[in-house]
Image (tube, rainbow, N blue to C red):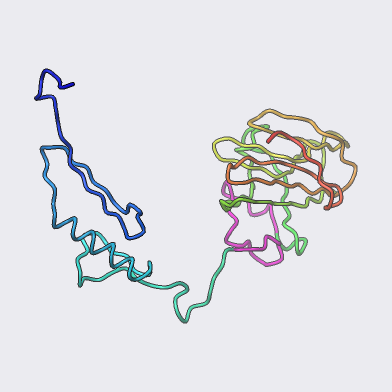
Amino acid sequence: VAPEDLTAIAATRGRCLIDPDGVIQGFEVLTPPVGRNVSETLRQVQAFQLVRESKGSQATPSGWKPGKMTLAGTKPVQGQEVTTPQSSDDFDKPALGPQWEWNHQPRIDKWSLSERPGFLRLQAFKPLRPDDLMTAGNTLTQRSFRSRENCVIAKLDLSGMVDGQKAGLCHFAQNHSALGVVQHGIVRRIEFRENGKLTEGPEIKTNHVWLKSSWGLDGKSQYAYSLNGQDFIPFGSV
């Protein structure tokens, strides 16, 4: 059915760039007031042809034309040492690895890698605000890789804990959650924290505890703890 007002009809013009495999590599749609540029379309076709012929080893910068310089290269650079992401989180070196960062400027007298070789020693001190994890000092952090399966296990030595202290493993960004150990008097307990909400767990009577966090691409973490480093007990919400 034709509209009564034919002036309301507007035609849009577009073009698609499709490679020999039938994959759309580019498209453009313009409204009537602006015309197309055939020369620009041909330039883009030549650029995609070059990339395809090089099997992806070359790329073209903005405004590239045949005969001009391309972006090319292989990794690793020939003659250079192959470097990989840090794969060990053991504290067996005199300095922290580059994968670690402090959530706040650290207090140098409250942590050490040399007091007990092979361990990171963190000493507790009064936070900026009570019971506020996000403002706790000397919080050591690491950005996680985005992959299908992720797991981190931290072993804590609790032999030096005293009344009122807390230690644990945390995920935080805009929101946060954590699994750890809190000591009240002479009693130590597992504690789960999620955005300030606390869930008390069982009493811990050993001096060592292992805390574990597992997560996938959805970023949802499942916490667990162990008293022997082998058998883990889930605790806390996902």
82 lies left or right of 227: left
Residue at position x 59%, y 50% from top?
102
- Can residue 160 be spotted in the picture? no
Quadrant for the C terminus in the image = top right
Image location of residue 114, percent across then percent down: 73, 63
Quadrant for the N terminus in the image = top left
Q: Nearer the viewer, residue 194 or 130?
A: 194
157 lies left or right of 145: right
From which residue to which does the magenta span run? 86-112
Q: Quadrant of residue 2?
A: top left
Image location of residue 181, percent across then percent down: 78, 40
Q: Nearer the viewer, residue 194 or 160?
A: 194
Q: Quadrant of residue 21?
A: bottom left
Asked whether 110 falls inside the magenta stretch, the response is yes
Image location of residue 202, percent across then percent down: 85, 35
Predominant SS along the magenta part:
loop
- Can residue 67 be spotted in the picture? yes
Image location of residue 225, percent across then percent down: 79, 44
Q: Residue furthest right?
A: 205
Q: Quadrant of residue 215?
A: top right
160 lies above or below 61: above
Q: Residue furthest bottom?
A: 79
Asked whether 213 falls inside the magenta stretch, the response is no
227 lies above or below 90: above
Residue at position x 72%, y 51% from top?
122
Residue at position x 56%, y 51% from top?
146
Q: How many marks?
A: 0
96 lies left or right of 33: right
Q: Residue furthest top?
A: 4
Q: Nearer the viewer, residue 51 or 198?
A: 51
